[in-house]
């Protein structure tokens, strides 16, 4: 019988399917705290998007009707999705650090930037149309 | 007599505690905004209930992780982070319900 490869348990489950705490070895505490703070920063971004969506619904005039929801609902959905991403990202980084592997690349920051730019443009158009129509 | 010096260099632990506190305050602010949206939209019960849930969650986060303490191991840390991600997702769902009901 051969020894399991590094980073895998004797029962054979690959590292990617186990909780990050079960694989590899504990990294430097500074990196652990930094990863936790990065998760918290992503999570606050998600909460900020939710707050922005709620604020759009609360402070845009009701007469705008569906245009008001066009601004608010995508922000709420984006915030919910980002809260899930924040945890998945923390898990992936924790696993990579414990296994001494390179930090995985993510396209989410770029996509988030585009999404926020697009939603800002939509919100700007809604506000201008509202001002012109008064 | 003092024990061994186990402090993490760079005040990493204190900065992490402050980050948890900011997160708890953000959850509370989201709850307050949700309440305003519900009240303005004639959904008093829904808005106050959603805000109450989020404010209780914010208090729990603040009290549970808002003090300097040992990490509690990888399992405890993972559960705390998963719980906060769950609260954020819950806030998005509650906000969606309140906004749609208030429209």
Image: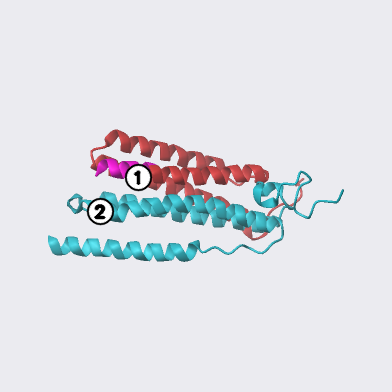
Chain colours: A cyan, B red
- Residue A85 x, y percent position in the rendering: 51, 53
Q: Which residue is mark 1?
A: B96
Label 2, residues with CA under 10 Å away: few <14, some 14-19, many ≥20: many
Residue drawn at x 51%, y 42% as measured from the top left: B61
Q: Is residue B100 magenta?
A: yes
Q: Is residue A15 above or below residue B35?
A: below
**In the image as oriented, which residue stretches furthest toward the front?**
A1
**In the image as oriented, which residue stretches furthest toward the right?**
A1
- Residue B42 x, y percent position in the rendering: 23, 38
User: How many circles with numbers are drawn on the protein?
Assistant: 2
Q: In what element is the residue under mark 1?
A: helix
Residue drawn at x 36%, y 44% as measured from the top left: B95
Label 1, residues with CA under 10 Å away: few <14, some 14-19, many ≥20: many
Q: In what element is the residue under mark 2?
A: helix
In the image, the segment drawn in magenta is B94-103
Q: Is residue B52 magenta?
A: no
Residue drawn at x 66%, y 54% as measured from the top left: A95
Q: Which residue is mark 2?
A: A68
């Amino acid at each position: 019988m051969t020894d399991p490869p590094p980073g895998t348990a004797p029962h054979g489950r690959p590292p990617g399917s186990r909780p990050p705490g079960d694989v590899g070895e504990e990294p430097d505490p500074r990196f652990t705290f930094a990863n936790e703070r990065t998760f918290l920063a992503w999570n606050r971004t998600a909460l900020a998007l939710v707050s922005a969506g709620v604020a759009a619904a609360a402070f845009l005039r009701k007469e705008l009707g569906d245009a008001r929801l066009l601004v608010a609902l995508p922000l709420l959905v984006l915030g919910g999705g980002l809260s899930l991403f924040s945890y998945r990202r923390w898990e992936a980084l924790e696993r990579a650090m414990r296994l001494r592997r390179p930090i995985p690349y993510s396209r989410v920051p770029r996509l988030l930037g585009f999404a926020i730019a697009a939603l800002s443009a939509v919100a700007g158009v809604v506000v201008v149309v509202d001002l012109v129509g008064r | 007599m003092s024990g061994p010096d186990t402090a993490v260099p760079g005040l990493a632990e204190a900065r992490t505690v402050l980050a948890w506190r900011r997160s708890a305050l953000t959850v509370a602010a989201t709850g307050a905004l949700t309440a305003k949206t519900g009240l303005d939209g004639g959904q008093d019960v829904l808005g106050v209930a959603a805000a109450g849930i989020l404010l209780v969650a914010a208090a729990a986060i603040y009290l549970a992780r808002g003090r300097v303490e040992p990490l509690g191991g990888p399992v405890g840390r993972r559960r705390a982070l998963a719980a906060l991600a769950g609260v954020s997702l819950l806030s998005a769902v509650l906000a969606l319900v309140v906004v749609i009901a208030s429209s």
